[in-house]
């Protein structure tokens, strides 16, 4: 379909703007690996400090790039499948809010006034513009849901009574409603804790409360990143793998999305297993729910594998009776038509297999105590958000600009090799980080000037080899990104060769069962919100026992200990003074 001028500009902007920033994000990823391996032995490099670079790396890659491209994909999906126009005013407001917000936060980070990492919970404090910028980005990202997608969804359903809404729309819609719900706790901590502290309106805050509210957002956030990738795996991958492939079961896919609605929220405490303020029982309950949230991913693994098997075996009868040999017929490296995209999804799936296993390790309460705050955790998330999610978003970005701008994909060979370099690099990186993590190698630490420095009393020689291996892996990953970027910018700057259009290859379902319960969202969301609230009442009570908003002064990276005593400590001192 043809996309009207200004809507096309917005969708392209939502892809190109974050990708320009991503260049900085990826660069700072490489710098991290070099610092940690001791190849850069300093507190800063080219005027950017270690924690400043780490914040830029996390915020740009995991927050800005993902959010904006997910909105672009959502806009395109709603347009293409529902064939209903998007409103230019709504789209421009959303886009400009995201751009201005990102620029404000970027200023704070580049100026060194927001070295708070991408998990910006207290007691680290940033410049107010960092929070205002983040808020604009997040609010801008939900504007299309309220003013474009929901009205279009409702009117489509009215016009198509009894029909299932297209699966891609279902996935994107579910994901964005979840996004709005998960924003509530983080907005509370930003508005009532972070901003007042940052503006100097209060001198003390409660960091345990902030962490709990942050993680009530922070874990569902990972599914906000993941579900667009799953949407592509269910709709696009089975089709392009042979050109006429099918999705094995439509209901299995919808059921997986529904399970995410239920289980994505009551699990944030698995990031706080070591949080002293929360009672262990609640942590255990949320650990069990975390195993629940792995189920829709396992379901996805089976549905995607069954779709691939069915599609390949229908196209190549010679492998019909094989148990595993059909895997060799998947076009892992193909320049034919849209098959180049297969390499992004398959490389991503292979990485996610590892990411899933390490996620289960993290979730296993007592085992978490071995890996928490070690490099095992970044090992895990570079194969999830840095694996399947990033590869799917890079792939779909290149796909969308080539279609929307009427360009042929330039340097297609590089575009196909890019995800495999990324995969190889990430796999080595994951191995090095995980094994080192099991030996206690810490995360978020400039180890090159401390533990890996032979002149330091902290020197730990057993970590050196792993850190150097992860730096080597980082070079392979960056090479993969350079291949992708050459193709992306080559395509962007090449002349138009055909009509610009918006289209997504879409697999029909082999089993398209009628399952009306899976098509109604309201009951699932009601249940999910109830479960979310109930599962968080006891931990929130725990963390507010010593004061709701005021407990501890803020820290910053220049001053890692509080200057004044928390009010609760002062109150506890009073009886002692009286006793004297
Ligand atoms: Fe996680 C920490 C547990 C999934 C991202 N996670 C993080 C952090 C990030 C992150 C960014 O329980 C760090 C936060 C920070 O900075 O502190 N995570 C899980 C669990 C899952 C999980 C149980 N995480 C994700 C996804 C992410 C993500 C998805 C991003 C997109 N994670 C944790 C825990 C922590 C944590 C703890 C805290 C650790 C700590 O101590 O700080 C599950 O959802 C995973 C389920 C996935 C599967 C895999 C299914 C496999 C598929 C591939 C099939 C392949 C095929 C191809 C068909 C069960 C779908 C064939 C392939 C072959 C090889 C045959």
Image: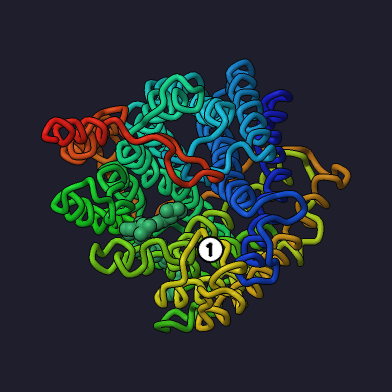
Q: Nearer the viewer, residue 424 or 454?
A: 454
Q: Nearer the viewer, residue 327 or 440?
A: 440
The residue sitting at the left extreme is 579
Q: Point out the image quarter for the C terminus.
A: top left
Q: Position of residue 574 (x, y in %)?
A: 19, 30
Q: Is residue 143 left or right of residue 411?
A: left
Please give the residue where the numbered disc 1 appears in the rendered image: 348
Residue at image position (65%, 26%) is: 100
Q: Nearer the viewer, residue 76 or 560?
A: 560
Q: Secondary structure at mark 1?
A: helix
The residue sitting at the right extreme is 495
522, above or below 57, in the image: above
Q: Nearer the viewer, residue 578 or 50?
A: 578
8, above or below 208, in the image: above
**Residue 208 picture quarter:** top left
Q: Position of residue 104 (x, y in %)?
A: 64, 29
Residue 343 can be seen in this image: yes
Residue 311 can be seen in this image: no
């Amino acid at each position: 379909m043809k996309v009207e001028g200004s809507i096309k500009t917005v969708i392209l902007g939502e892809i190109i703007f974050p990708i320009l920033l991503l260049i900085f994000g990826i660069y700072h990823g490489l710098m991290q690996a070099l610092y940690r391996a001791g190849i850069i032995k300093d507190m800063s490099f080219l005027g950017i400090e270690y924690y400043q670079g780490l914040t830029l790396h996390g915020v740009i890659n995991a927050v800005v790039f993902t959010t904006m491209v997910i909105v672009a994909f959502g806009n395109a999906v709603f347009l293409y499948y529902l064939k209903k126009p998007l409103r230019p005013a709504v789209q421009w407001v959303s886009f400009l809010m995201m751009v201005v917000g990102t620029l404000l936060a970027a200023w704070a980070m580049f100026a060194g006034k927001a070295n708070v990492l991408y998990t910006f919970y207290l007691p680290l404090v940033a410049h107010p513009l960092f929070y205002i910028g983040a808020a604009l980005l997040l609010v801008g990202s939900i504007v299309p849901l309220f003013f474009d997608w929901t009205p279009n969804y409702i009117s489509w359903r009215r016009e198509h009574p009894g029909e299932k809404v297209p699966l891609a729309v279902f996935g994107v819609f579910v994901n964005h409603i979840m996004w709005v719900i998960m924003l509530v706790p983080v907005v509370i901590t930003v508005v009532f804790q972070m901003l007042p502290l940052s503006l100097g309106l209060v001198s003390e805050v409660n960091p345990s409360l902030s962490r709990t509210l942050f993680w009530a957002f922070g874990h569902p956030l990972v599914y906000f990143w993941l579900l667009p990738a799953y949407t592509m795996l269910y709709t696009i991958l089975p089709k392009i793998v042979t050109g006429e492939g099918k999705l094995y079961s439509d209901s299995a896919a919808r059921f997986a999305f529904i399970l995410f609605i239920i289980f994505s929220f009551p699990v944030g405490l698995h990031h706080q297993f070591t949080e002293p303020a929360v009672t262990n029982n609640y942590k255990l309950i949320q650990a069990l729910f975390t195993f629940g949230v792995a189920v829709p991913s396992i379901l996805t693994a089976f549905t995607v594998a069954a779709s691939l098997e069915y599609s390949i075996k229908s196209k190549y009868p010679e492998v019909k009776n094989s148990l595993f040999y059909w895997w060799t017929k998947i076009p892992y490296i193909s320049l034919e038509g849209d098959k180049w995209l297969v390499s992004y999804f398959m490389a991503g799936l292979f990485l996610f297999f590892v990411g899933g296993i390490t996620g289960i390790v993290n979730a296993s309460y007592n085992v978490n105590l071995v890996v928490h705050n070690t490099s095992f955790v970044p090992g895990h998330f570079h194969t999830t958000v840095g694996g399947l999610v990033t590869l799917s978003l890079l792939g779909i970005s290149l796909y969308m600009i080539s279609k929307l701008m009427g360009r042929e994909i330039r340097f297609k060979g590089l575009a196909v090799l890019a995800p495999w370099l990324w995969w190889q690099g990430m796999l080595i990186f994951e191995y090095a980080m995980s094994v080192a993590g099991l030996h206690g190698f810490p995360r978020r630490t400039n180890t090159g000037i401390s533990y890996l420095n032979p002149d330091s009393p902290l020197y730990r020689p057993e970590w050196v080899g792993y850190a150097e291996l992860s730096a080597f892996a980082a070079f392979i990953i960056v090479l993969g990104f350079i291949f992708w970027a050459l193709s992306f910018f080559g395509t962007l700057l090449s002349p138009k060769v055909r009509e610009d259009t918006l289209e997504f290859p879409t697999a029909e379902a082999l089993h398209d069962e009628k399952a009306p319960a899976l098509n109604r969202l309201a009951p699932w969301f009601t249940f999910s919100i109830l479960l979310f609230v109930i599962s968080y009442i006891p931990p929130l009570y725990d963390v507010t026992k010593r004061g709701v908003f005021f407990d501890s002064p803020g820290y910053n990276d220049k001053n890692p200990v509080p200057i004044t005593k928390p009010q609760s400590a002062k109150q506890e001192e009073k009886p002692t003074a009286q006793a004297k």
